Image (tube, grey):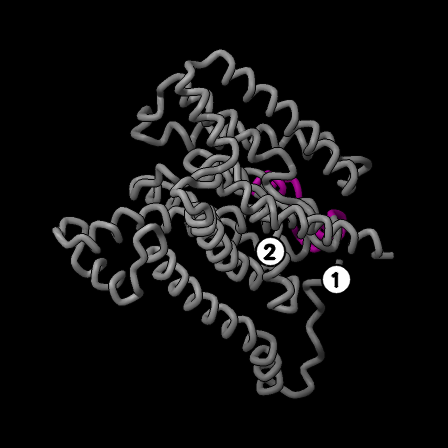
Amino acid sequence: MKNLEAPPAPNNGGARGEGTKKHRRFSGPPIIGGGGGLLLLASLILAVGIGQVHLSPGEVWTGLRHGPNSLDSNAEIVWSRLPRVCLAALVGASLAAAGVAFQALLRNDLADPYLVGVSAGASVGSEATILAHQEAALGGFALPVAAFGAASAAMTVVYTLARRQGRVLVTSLLLVGVVVSAFLGGISTLLMMFSRPNDAQYLQFRLNGSLQDATLAQCGVTLGFLVAGLLILSVEARAMNLFALGEESAQQLGVETERFKTILIITGSLLTAATVAFAGIIGFVGLMSPHIARKLARTPDHRIVLPLATLGGSILMVWADTAARSLLPDGRELPVGIVTAFFGAIFFLYLLRRQGRTP
């Protein structure tokens, strides 16, 4: 892993030279981020217009201006699709930010909420809440709270079991993640077997990811979890850079590593919880988005990678869900998790093969 916090260069050129270096370092990512923001906005407008009834961007904009209570047919279509498209963007951003957190924690580009068992843990927590018909408990926060608790427990188990002599090896991480995910998948199956037929069918569809039941209230809860997670990760961005040098080196540079690891486990689980609670298990978004962000930014600096990955995850998820609801000609929908798994599996194999070539 490259040195992310290089020592300061000698100040031979004075303040002017230092300012020039900073400008050179940060001029590229803001341009990419601005372009990503515009691309996300365009994606949201275009995605709202795609469906069995296609609307132009102008019609979408007019429908938004008319408001949700308008009698205009186009406005009704726009506002019926808007919660789903917004939730897709928020889910993608949350999964991408969680991917950044777990990759920083494990110091490996292959880490992902889906691969390390966090999504499976969150799924068990939310499924148990649904089967108990307690979704409305805690002021409507029961689903994400239960998912958060189970996700945190799963990630703690995976991290503890994969750790050997102060290090987390890739092979250990993947194997433990697969085992924990399989165990939690068995629990999910048991829950479905002992549930009512209607509940079992609904849970089965959720296992593959779905945004079909999205509401603006769910968007609000997910946005709250996302903002909290991004604020925490932004504060810890410098520590993530130092931790990439190794745990001992980070300690020598002033990072309280045990506190840092606890914060990242909790934050990654927090970001994953709301997505699984409202959208089910959606894999590989947290794997692909941070890697693409690092390639675009040409730096592993988490202060730059985090916002770019968040934007990229939003865009990726918006179009994955748009494809899931519009690919089949007869009006049926594909689970969005199948769409992300198709591309994510290929991407994962590429990363695994590339890491295998690394000396």
Q: Which mark is residue 290?
A: 2
Query: Label 1 is placed on what type of residue?
Result: Lys
Q: Is residue 104 left or right of residue 77?
A: right
| Residue at the right extreme of this rendering | 359
Residue 135 located within the stretch drawn in magenta: no
| Residue situated in front as seen by the camera: 351 or 263 | 351
| Residue at the top extreme of this rendering | 194
| Residue at the front extreme of this rendering | 330
Quadrant in the picture for residue 134: top left
Total numbered circles = 2
- Which residue is the site of mark 1? 2
Q: Which mark is residue 262?
A: none
Query: Label 2 is placed on what type of residue?
Result: Pro
* Helix, strand or loop under label 2: helix
Give the residue displayed 66% in from the left and 27% down from the top: 180
350 w.r.t. 15: above or below = above
Viewport quadrant of the C terminus: bottom right
| Residue at the left extreme of this rendering | 71
Quadrant in the picture for residue 182: top right
Q: Is residue 92 left or right of residue 18?
A: left
* Helix, strand or loop under label 1: loop
CA gap, disc 1 to disc 2? 16 Å
How packed mark 1 is, by other alpha carbons closer than 10 Å (few <14, some 14-19, many 20 or more), is few
Viewport quadrant of the N terminus: bottom right
The residues colored magenta run 247-263
